[in-house]
């Protein structure tokens, strides 16, 4: 469970402002149910010229004071118990789903490419088999090979395929698609196509992904100032809801300046085959 801070600007007029301020002092967080998990709360907070009353906000958030989803433009005070929720495994799941979706749309010949997944905490080990039809080799960089051992065994028994486990990223001879489930990139990826939810400087072609599509019921109550991926991640990690388990990032920025195409899948083909070449 968590609290979304929904900021409201002050009304116009002296008496309207005074009445509004009083109403905000009396209001409490409102509970909203999820499809298959715990509920979450929304607390409206007044953001006037003196800022937000953090003492009152902290008091109203109660036991969920360390689980706050707030606009990224707002800086929470360091000297209070209020803590912003920082997505953990959810961003890794979203970037994995996004990369897989783009790879599928690109229709790349599997023998032309390898796929490397950076998953140091083994957070998406149960999903790794979904990559098998799309590459000649699937590699995983992880600090938890113990969590991948049973998965690799099952994949070998069911599909006759082997997953290569490595402690660190190593370039390969083929064109390599790297999916950074923990967001981190490295200089050794300079010739690869890199998918990440963090802006990076490494990768011959980089796909920076962010945001996610919220359901209609959530779009009605969650303001645009709240990062949609932050909210979807909180719902997944703090409420145990699976509503966004299969979600992808909704925005992808690409540094490709060769083909001049805004389509992520066509830019990926440009990286694999070169400009103007077909599969």
Image (cartoon, grey):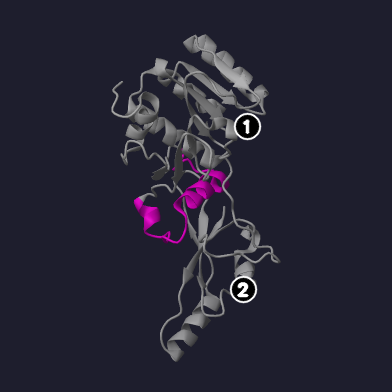
Residue at 53% x, 60% y: name it.
70
Does residue 231 sit above or below 178 in this rendering? below
Q: In the rendering, at what x and y percent does residue 278 appear?
A: 28, 22
**Viewer-nearest residue: 75 or 239:** 75
Question: From the viewer's perspective, is 9 left or right of 267?
Answer: right
Question: Is residue 247 in the magenta section?
Answer: no
List x then y, in percent, for residue 191.
50, 29
Q: Nearer the viewer, residue 178 or 96?
A: 178
Q: Residue at x 35, y 30 (%)?
A: 270
> Left or right: 52 with respect to 175?
right
Q: x and y percent of residue 208 in the render?
A: 46, 43
Sort mark 1 into few (<14), some (14-19) or many (20+) by Cα contacts within 10 Å: some
Element assignment for label 1 = loop
Q: At numbered mark 2, what does the secondary structure look like: helix, strand or loop?
A: helix
Task: Tell me which corner region of the image, top left, top right, bottom left or bottom right, holds residue 66.
Answer: bottom right
Residue 193 in the image, given as x and y percentages of width and height: 46, 31
Label 2 sits on residue: 56
Task: Check the image and report above or below for 152 versus 28.
Answer: above
Q: Which of 255 and 218 is in front in this view?
A: 255
Q: Viewed as shown, does residue 242 lie left or right of 220?
A: right
Q: Please state the extent of the stretch shown in magenta in the rendering.
A: 216-245
Residue where numbered disc 1 is placed: 120
Residue visible at 56% across and 75% down?
Answer: 51
Alpha carbon of mark 1 to alpha carbon of mark 2: how far?
A: 40 Å
- Earlier along the polypeptide chain: callout 1 or callout 2? 2
Q: Residues within 10 Å of mark 2 (few under 14, many from 20)?
A: few
Let me know if residue 236 is in the magenta part: yes
- Residue mark closest to the camera, 1 vs 2: 1
Q: Which residue lies furthest to the right in this view?
A: 79
Q: Quadrant of residue 112?
A: top left
Give the position of the C terminus as an image quadrant.
top left
């Amino acid at each position: 469970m968590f609290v979304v801070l929904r900021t409201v600007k002050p009304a116009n007029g002296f008496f309207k402002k005074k009445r509004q301020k009083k109403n905000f002092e009396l209001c409490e967080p409102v509970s909203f149910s999820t499809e298959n998990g715990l509920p979450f709360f929304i607390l409206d907070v007044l953001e006037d010229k003196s800022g937000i009353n953090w003492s009152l906000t902290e008091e109203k958030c109660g036991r969920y004071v360390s689980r706050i989803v707030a606009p990224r433009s707002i800086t929470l005070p360091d000297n209070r118990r209020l803590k912003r929720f920082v997505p953990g495994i959810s961003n890794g799941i979203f970037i994995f789903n996004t990369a897989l979706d783009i790879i599928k749309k690109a229709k790349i010949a599997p023998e032309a490419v390898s796929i490397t997944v950076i998953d140091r905490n083994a957070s998406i080990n149960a999903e790794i088999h979904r990559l098998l039809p799309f590459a000649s080799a699937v590699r995983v960089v992880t600090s938890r090979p113990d969590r991948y051992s049973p998965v690799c065994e099952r994949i070998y028994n069911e599909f006759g395929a082997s997953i290569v486990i490595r402690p660190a990223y190593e370039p390969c001879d083929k064109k390599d698609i790297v999916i950074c489930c923990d967001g981190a990139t490295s200089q050794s990826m300079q010739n690869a196509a890199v998918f990440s939810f963090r802006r990076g400087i490494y990768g011959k072609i980089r796909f920076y992904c962010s945001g996610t599509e919220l359901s209609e019921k959530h779009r009605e109550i969650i303001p645009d100032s709240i990062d949609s991926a932050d909210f979807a991640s909180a719902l997944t990690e703090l409420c145990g809801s699976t509503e966004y388990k299969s979600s992808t990032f909704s925005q992808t920025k690409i540094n490709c300046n060769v083909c001049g195409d805004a389509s992520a899948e066509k830019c990926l083909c440009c990286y694999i085959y070169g400009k103007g070449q077909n599969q």
